[in-house]
Amino acid sequence: MNRRMKFLTGETYHLFNRGNRKAEIFHDREDYLHFLRQLRDYLQEFPMTLIAYCLMPNYFHLLAQQDGDGAISGIVQTTVAGLIGGVVL
């Protein structure tokens, strides 16, 4: 059975990820900057509003509103998975 979550336009979602076994995913300043640059670029491609974010050495949180169909799924698949290697919703 397919249990994919359906993200609804106009709704706000908390997206987060933590390193495997709490391992660091950001090792230095450049890692944080790389993540933020990539996130900025992808936000221009997907109809989504980033409300807030928090980056810590071993995890991050994004609070985002989906402004168009497929935005959250698209950004999770391309940005988050591509930058970190996986996501927990």
Image (cartoon, rainbow, N blue to C red):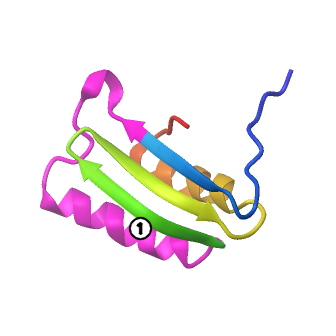
Residue 34 place in picture, x, y as percent: 29, 65
What residue is drawn where x is 46% and y is 66%?
Answer: 51
Q: Residue furthest front?
A: 11
What residue is drawn where x is 69% and y is 70%?
Answer: 67
Residue 8 place in picture, x, y as percent: 76, 55
Residue 3 place in picture, x, y as percent: 79, 28
Question: Is 12 left, or right, of 8 in this rendering?
Answer: left
Amino acid, disc 1: Gln
Check disc 1 and report the residue beneath it. Answer: 38
When the figure is inspected, residue 26 is found, relative to residue 39, above or below; the finding is above
Examine the rendering and report whether any part of residue 83 can be seen.
Answer: no
- Identify the image quadrant of the C terminus: top right
Q: Residue furthest bottom?
A: 44
Question: Is 48 left, or right, of 81 in this rendering?
Answer: right
Magenta span contains residue 3: no
User: What span is colored magenta in the figure?
Assistant: 17-46
Task: Provide the secondary structure element on which disc 1 rests.
Answer: helix
Front in this rendered view, residue 20 or 65: 65
- Identify the image quadrant of the N terminus: top right
Majority secondary structure of magenta residues:
helix
* Circle 1 residues within 10 Å: few <14, some 14–19, many ≥20: some
Residue 54 place in picture, x, y as percent: 31, 54
When the figure is inspected, residue 76 is found, relative to residue 52, above or below; the finding is above
